[in-house]
């Protein structure tokens, strides 16, 4: 019996909690992609770099705060920097729209033109970010590292398998829940939010109802900036911040948005968790888990890992291809690309 | 001087051929004007042109003496115009009630009275107020579409094939109320 409990704790510790955290981060990223797609009707490839930009500003402000000796321990200092990061990123989004996207929108360019423009902005942002903060790995978290660690857990329960819960994981989950609740309240309860949904549903009819498209677009970029900054910072807090990572992160984020149904916020969240749990559970080494459950003599020799973590991005890619083949609208019936 | 006039309107979709060729429409205040023609004659196109959803190559549109040719559709709504298009005339993913709310988007005052009037006109909508408009029957959708346009209390209401699929009794009632 104790072996079964240990096996369950093992899964909880190395698969469920990390998957949940990663899923939250992907969900927030995918929400930004899906909002832009729903309103502006193009896939924003610069979204990963927008996240990176927001996280970078937060880190720069965090360093400054740390140099002043400001601290909110046990919570990480970077949380204090979020408002500044959000403001800067929203401004950056609005400027990108003003200088690039608006031109193509007025020309009534096809979505693919906007998509290519966003790829251009992606490289521009990426270069700028590397120039500003450097390509190195940065540790973002300070304050208490764990809410409870594996040793404390073993002590308290007497089990041989430990369960740790990092502060960054707790923060990620709490912030995601609050942010998603606020976003859905905004979209479903406020007039501005409803006008966004109306615009996404039927652009012509929204115009006929007197909804101002420029305002809807502006609100969309504000929301995108908020979501991107928080998603990027949470990811950096949980792992570490490295500009290069956000280029790779684009694939699972788009996979999440598409799997859930592009343009559908609920789908983006579901998609985020589908991708995260698939990735974590396929690259997980099940050897120890199986060892707990079978007699000693049957203990497996290999790692029992379906796919090496080096190939984790292949998981998103395969899921993406399967969804596009079998159900192009995604789980929640978004728009067909 | 007529209330609404589209004068010598010429234009088509995108860069394509002219669909409207020197088309003139005038309507007086309190008048009901009807445009009749075979399928594909350009009736819907003319209405879109009046509402600014089509770039005119020539001609102009006047409302109450004012030249509104350069105004965007959303600006024309604020001038008191309302339009129910022939197709895609409801927000399918939003509830009946939200559709009506969006119709009243430009209003800052209390809309509950107007909404009650619309529900009195189309009782079925009150029953289905919480249901997404995309899940209604064709005739019911048409009622949502007209209700949405009525929510701004427009001075000028343009209906493209309003009777399509709606029972004659309901339509009779509607026209009685409008007049
Ligand atoms: N979005 C569009 N793009 C290009 N051409 C269009 C478009 N909509 C309509 N047309 C063309 O314009 C012409 C007039 O169409 P319109 O919809 O105005 O006709 P209608 O008089 O309203 O017909 P119906 O009685 O069938 O509603 C048709 O030849 C049609 O092919
Ligand atoms: Mg027509």
Image (tube, coloured by chain):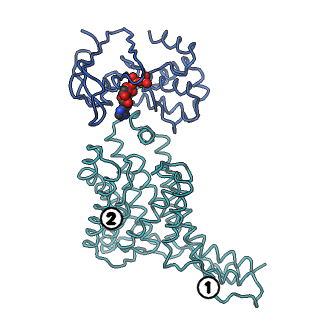
Chain colours: A cyan, B blue
Between residues A309 and A149, which one lies in front from this camera angle?
A: A309
Badge number at residue A147: none
Residue found 79% across the figure and 78% down from its top: A1
For marks 2 and 1 on the same chain, the one whose residue lies earlier in the sequence: 2
Decide: few, some or many residues near mark 2? Use Cα within 10 Å; few <14, some 14-19, many ≥20.
many
Residue A170, position as x, y percentages in the image: 53, 67
Decide: few, some or many residues near mark 1? Use Cα within 10 Å; few <14, some 14-19, many ≥20.
few
- Is label 2 in a helix, a strand or a loop? helix
User: Split into 4 quadrants, where in the image is the N terminus of chain B?
Assistant: top left
Examine the rendered structure and indicate whether residue A7 appears above or below residue A33: below
Task: Please give the count of numbered marks on the rendered protein.
Answer: 2
Examine the rendered structure and indicate whether residue B31 appears above or below residue A125: above
Residue A301, position as x, y percentages in the image: 66, 90
State ligand 2's quadrant. Answer: top left
Residue found 27% across the figure and 19% down from its top: B23
- What residue does disc 1 label? A303
- What residue does disc 2 label? A53
Examine the rendered structure and indicate whether residue A57 appears above or below residue A197: below
- Is label 1 in a helix, a strand or a loop? loop
Whole-number angstrom distance, CA of label 2 to CA of label 1: 38 Å
User: Split into 4 quadrants, where in the image is the C terminus of chain B?
Assistant: top left
């Amino acid at each position: 019996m104790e072996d079964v409990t240990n096996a369950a704790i093992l899964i909880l510790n190395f698969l469920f909690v990390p998957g949940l955290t990663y899923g939250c981060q992907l969900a927030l990223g995918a929400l930004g992609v899906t909002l832009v797609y729903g309103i502006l009707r193009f896939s924003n490839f610069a979204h990963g770099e927008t996240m990176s930009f927001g996280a970078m500003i937060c880190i720069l402000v965090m360093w400054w705060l740390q140099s002043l000796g400001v601290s909110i321990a046990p919570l990480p200092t970077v949380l204090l920097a979020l408002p500044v990061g959000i403001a800067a990123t929203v401004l950056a989004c609005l400027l990108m729209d003003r200088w690039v996207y608006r031109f193509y929108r007025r020309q009534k360019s096809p979505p693919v033109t906007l998509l290519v423009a966003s790829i251009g902005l992606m490289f521009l942002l990426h270069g700028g970010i590397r120039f500003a903060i450097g390509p190195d790995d940065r540790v973002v978290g300070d304050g208490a590292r764990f809410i409870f660690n594996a040793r404390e857990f073993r002590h308290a329960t007497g089990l041989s398998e430990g369960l740790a819960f990092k502060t960054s994981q707790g923060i990620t989950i709490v912030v995601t829940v609050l942010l998603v609740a606020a976003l859905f309240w905004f979209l479903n309860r406020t007039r501005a939010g409803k006008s966004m949904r109306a615009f996404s549903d039927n652009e012509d009819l929204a115009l006929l109802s007197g909804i101002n498209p420029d305002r809807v677009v502006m609100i969309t970029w504000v929301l995108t900036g908020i979501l991107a900054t928080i998603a990027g910072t949470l990811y950096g807090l949980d792992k570490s911040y490295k500009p290069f990572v956000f280029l790779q992160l684009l694939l699972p984020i788009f996979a999440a948005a598409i799997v859930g149904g592009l343009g559908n916020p609920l789908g983006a969240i579901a998609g985020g968790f589908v991708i995260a749990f698939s990735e974590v559970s396929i690259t997980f080494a099940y050897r120890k888990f199986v060892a707990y459950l079978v007699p000693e003599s049957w203990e497996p020799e290999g790692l029992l890992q379906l796919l090496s973590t080096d190939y984790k991005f292949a998981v998103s890619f395969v899921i993406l291809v399967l969804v596009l083949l079998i159900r192009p609208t995604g789980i929640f019936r978004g728009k067909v690309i | 001087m007529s209330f609404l006039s589209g004068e010598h309107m010429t234009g088509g979709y995108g860069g394509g051929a002219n669909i409207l060729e020197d088309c003139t429409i005038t309507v007086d205040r309190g008048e009901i004007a009807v445009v009749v023609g075979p399928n594909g004659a350009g009736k819907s196109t003319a209405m879109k042109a009046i509402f600014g959803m089509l770039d005119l190559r020539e001609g102009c549109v006047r409302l109450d003496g004012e030249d509104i040719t350069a105004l965007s559709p959303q600006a024309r709504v604020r001038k008191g115009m309302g339009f129910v298009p022939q197709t895609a005339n409801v927000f399918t993913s939003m509830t009946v009630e939200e559709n009506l709310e969006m119709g009243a988007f430009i209003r800052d005052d209390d809309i509950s009275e107007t909404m009650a009037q619309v529900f009195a006109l189309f009782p079925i909508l009150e029953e289905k107020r919480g249901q997404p408009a995309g899940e209604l029957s064709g005739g019911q959708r048409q009622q949502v579409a007209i209700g949405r346009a009525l929510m701004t209390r427009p001075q000028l209401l343009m209906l493209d094939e309003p009777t399509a699929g709606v029972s004659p009794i309901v339509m009779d009632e509607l026209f009685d109320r409008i007049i």
